Amino acid sequence: MKKLLLLIVAAGFIAAGPPAAAQDTIKIGLMCPLTGSWAAEGQDMKQIVQLLAGQVNDRGGLLGKNVDVVIGDDGADPRTAALAAQRLATRDVSAVIGTYGSSVTEASQNIYASAGIIQIANGSTAVRLTEKDLPYFFRTCPRDDEQARVAVKTLMENNYEQIAILHDNTTYAKGLADETKKLLDDKNAEVVFFNALTPGEQDYTTILTKLKSDNPDVVFFTGYYPEAAMLLRQKRDMGWDVPFIGGDANNNPDLVKIAGKEAAAGFRFLSPPVPQDLPSAQARDFLSSYKGKYGSAPGSIWAVLAGDAFRVIVKAIEETGSTDTDKLADYLHNDLEAFPGLTGPIAFNEKGDRVGDVYRVYKVNAEGNFVLQE
Amino acid sequence: MEVFFTQLTNGLAVGGIYALIALGYTMVYGVLKLINFAHGDLFTIGAYLGLSLLTSLALTDHVGAAAGIVILAVMVMGLVGVIGILLDRAAYKPLRTSPRLSAVVSALGASIVFSNTVMLVYGPNPKVYPQGILPTTVFHVFGLPVPIMRFVILGASVILMIGLYVFIQRTKIGTAIRAAAIDQDAARLMGINVDRVIMLVFFIGPALGGAAGVMVGLYYGQIKFTMGWIYGLKAFTAAILGGIGNIPGAMVGGLLLGVIESLGAAYISMAWKDAIAFFVLILILIVRPTGLLGERVAEKV
């Protein structure tokens, strides 16, 4: 029996081969949802990071070595993500990019932290992720409270005096509404209405009538697009022309289909820019090579933020000339300033959150298209 | 005061739809003592079938808006009625002699099957009725702007309700339905084909639900495969409120529920709208356990 065991162990060593021909590549992990409900996002993330890695290798690699992207599928599910993270952590990666969902990222955070691996999330906006004092965690996407800050800025810039806030009691929408109200109260702006509708209903005329009687200059709706569309449509039927501003859950073309072009025209919402509207020259180059390779533009901004995570890591490794986690983290926290990312300038604060404006204001025009406002 | 009356009309418009769906609940309950929990999903199916027929046949282009919508509604009512009969055959008839709880469980199962079928056929995203078919004229009643469609919806609900009431009270078949509702065995001894009566009930009830589905689709524009759940629950409440098994009761219950919701949301609390409506339901049931117009004590389900 002992002999058999020995044999098996020996066979295992032989199969494993000589212990990794000592680092002739730099490995960067990518954890993304290739299956499950966000598979479309995950496929985009994979394509983008592989495209960028190919470009780095064509330029002669990183510190004279080729970049190797190691992919782990998190299945858009926290449990699968924990397994994927453990697997990636044993694959000798210098840093890990990802992932999309906040709860999925959260399940992997401590695994990377205890393995001493840098993690840069790309789509996880929940505030608490960077409130845990994890020294190696960063993200290229904005936090949920950043959106509230931009909302307040937009409301103030337009000189609205009486502001109505409407949410739908979901965690996300209520959080955004609460945060916005808090910031408005700090600025002594007058919030004349703060209440919730019941999502999934068809008739919101009762709420609109109530809103109208409070006579706001603007309504900020933090919920999702199906309800926003019904509100816009019924508001128009009532003959009420108050401006509506929505949160980033309204960035969906179905909004215009449901509301109708006339009712949707003039509606503004906050959102990170869609890939086609990305501001920089880097972004234009990137989009044209992406289209050249895969045939169409990436579906959402969140996948492009994974590309930014990759470019930031490459930059850090180049500048520090090292793949040491502490050196990289120190560089990202302190020395990276206004790095020209695909989605605009990138820098990180001491928590690992991205600094700078990512959110933009979009407006629906008369043809029903979403137009970026400068 | 103007706001009060506007909220009143808002409530009546929603209540008219609740009432129309509640009629289907009440009819089936009246005859079989069965709460047909799949009724809300028959309403959803009506809305989706209406959309398919509207876009594929382009009726309103050929015969004009009003006639087109009437033809559309009749077609959908027929189709949903047939689905109702099939539902009865597949899910309820085999359980006619079983304990009543089995039929309720079967109804819940049918509801899940229907809503998932709609999702698989039409997809999970909300669908949109084509716009510009309905007139958008706004009437002014005592200085209050009221869209014409509100009158049309309320009017259609009232007409269907009165039609049904007359049919049940004045015709021979209606008498047979009432007889089957009181005592199926005695009705059978009197020469009434009870199975035929039940089939008819399962045609009329779902057909009314289908008509409500088309109205909601046309008026609100957006339909979702999950919408039958909320509307079904509200209509069920309306039927209980008015006295389940009682046709005018469903109408009164539906309108009352719509108005309570609307005024509760406007003057008490918007987020507590549903809680207020159900609180009123509990109060009414404490004072009148049979509902407002109910005669029989609702037996336990």
Image: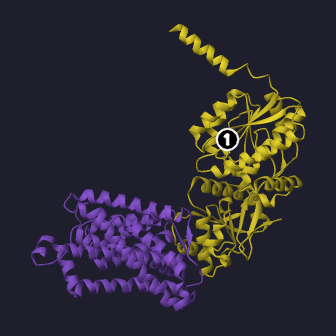
Chain colours: A yellow, B purple
Q: Residue at x 25, y 83 (%)?
A: B168
Q: Position of residue A325 (x, y in %)?
A: 79, 29
Q: In this rendering, does residue B144 appear at all? A: no
Q: Position of residue A22 (x, y in %)?
A: 80, 22
Provide residue A180's location: percent of width, then percent of height. Answer: 68, 57
Q: Nearer the viewer, residue A299 or A236?
A: A299
Count of picture labels: 1
Chain bearing tag 1 is A
Q: Is residue B131 left or right of residue A143?
A: left
Query: What residue appears at the point 13 percent right and 75 percent down from the top-left corner?
Result: B187
Amino acid type at image mark 1: Leu
Q: Nearer the viewer, residue B127 or B279?
A: B127
> In the figure, A41 relative to B249: above or below?
above
Seen as rendered, the residue at the extreme left is B189
Q: Which residue is mark 1?
A: A129
**In the picture provided, is B232 more to the left or to the right than A163?**
left
Q: Quadrant of residue A360?
A: bottom right
Image: A68 above or below B131: above
Determine crowd level at label 1: few under 14, some 14-19, many 20+ residues with C-alpha closer than 10 A: many
